[in-house]
Image (spheres, rainbow, N blue to C red):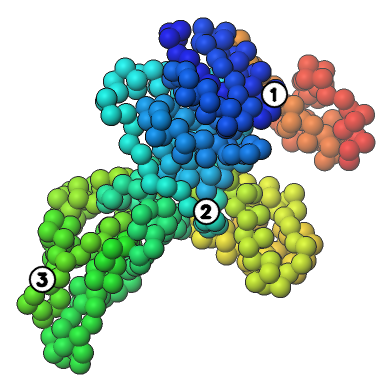
Amino acid sequence: MPNAAKILVVDDEENIRWVFQKALVKRGLEVDAAASAEEALEKIQTSDYLMVFTDIFMGGQSGLDLLDAVKPIAPGLKVVVMTAEDTMNNTIEAMRRGAFDYIGKPFDFDEVYALIDRALKSRAAARPEGEPEGPAGREGFSLDAIVGKSRRMQEIFKTIGRAAPADLAVLITGESGTGKEMVARALHYYSPRRDKPFICINCAAISRDLLETELFGHEKGAFTGAVESKEGKFELADGGTLFLDEIGDMELALQAKILRVLQDHQFFKVGGRSPIHSDARIVAATNQDLAKLMEEKRFREDLYHRLNVIPVHLPPLRERMEDVPLIARHFLGRFRGVLGRGDIHLSPEAERIFLGYRWPGNIRELENVVKRAMVLASSGPILLEHLPPSMTEGRSPEFWEDRLVRLIDDYLKQSPHQKDGRLHEHLTQAIEKCLFEQLLKEHAGKQVPVARKLGINRNTLKRKIDQLGIDLKKVKNRH
């Protein structure tokens, strides 16, 4: 890494500053430190830094305040916000205000080094005018329906923060129940249009004949039953955001009219003769494969490219299982008062089931499962008996394979044996030890029935017990 980079670390915790300095100096970097945003601002005004790594919550001014103050005086400075509370709102707010990136504590220094490399490459190719500035921040927003600390969700929060101030079309894709509408609402709230209407229309929920009228409105007498003029969604959303949910279900003829609005920013009411101007930002969403629909000539390619200026893909819940307990606890807190429930929480057994379930209905299904369990449990822990039978009975081989894949994936991410050339040995021994200990526990340490169940002879089992260091006394005591 080139030594031309000068880094400023801002944190009110001395140990964080010390660790950062030690790690970066080892890489040949020059590092300054500041204990507050105010001290950091003084240093920035007198020194030339490549990057600033700042904590978000400090005594006095926050890291976000520092971010705002830096932009007018050093627009090309790359500011990375870091915090132990990597919530959606913090991430979006930091990115919206123009942060270079956002990382959670405890951080991985490989990620820090990668960010510094990115900043060096960015500086080498930077435009003279520096980084674009986002609009001023707003206080007090909590979009509590979007919850997630997984890396994939953090990347989505960053995208929302970057995309919200840009007055461009956004296409949100993902399976049903992944939270596409809530992302659309977040894009609107963090945009300069937040004080204007957010209008939502589900293109799949309205009949083909009525959808055009719903979108564009109609004049009095335009058709039988049109006894008065009606405003459409495009007109109602003027100056704000129009969310076209399930855009993939829209008929081709209507797609052409939507395309015209996006191109010309005007439309005609059904039965109308005068054009109406529309200044609505379009955010569209679908759970369908638009590429396949375009191949089948069921979705216009030109409309797709108009909508897909900023793509946001929401992963299914099964691909971010680490977020499941967090989301479940969020729903418990959210519905506790609504449902009149007291101290209610997930039992360890229920949490294990939650982590092992595939969640085909995604967040919407998780929300309904939590509501059902809260009603049945009334108070205290949520137990297996409070969960739907589909979650606790009849597990398929695919279910266990999926769960094993996730466990192995977690092991690979955290294993200290990645580079010693014995990964297979370490992993198989870990699995064998867990398996043997569990069976010995079930059979009170009796080796004959365990060997029979495993399909090996007793001498082989005894040799494995010795090799794996299994303490038979402890296994029997746990029974």
Decide: marks 2, 3 in contact (CB < 8 A)?
no
- Which residue position holds label 3? 275
Q: In this view, does 268 lie above or below 161?
A: below
Quarter holding residue 287: bottom left
Left or right: residue 345 versus residue 121 is right
- Which residue position holds label 2? 139
Q: Nearest the camera: 190 or 76?
A: 76
Other-residue count near label 3 (Cα within 10 Å), few / some / many at <14 / 14–19 / ≥20: few
Q: Which residue is drawn at 64% across and 66% down?
A: 335
Q: Is residue 468 above or below residue 84?
A: above
Q: Name the amino acid type tagged 2.
A: Glu
- Which residue position holds label 1? 14
Q: In this view, does 382 lie above or below 231?
A: above
Where disc 3 sits, the SS reads loop
Q: Name the amino acid type tagged 3.
A: Pro
Q: Name the amino acid type tagged 1.
A: Glu
Of circles 2 and 3, the one toward us is: 2
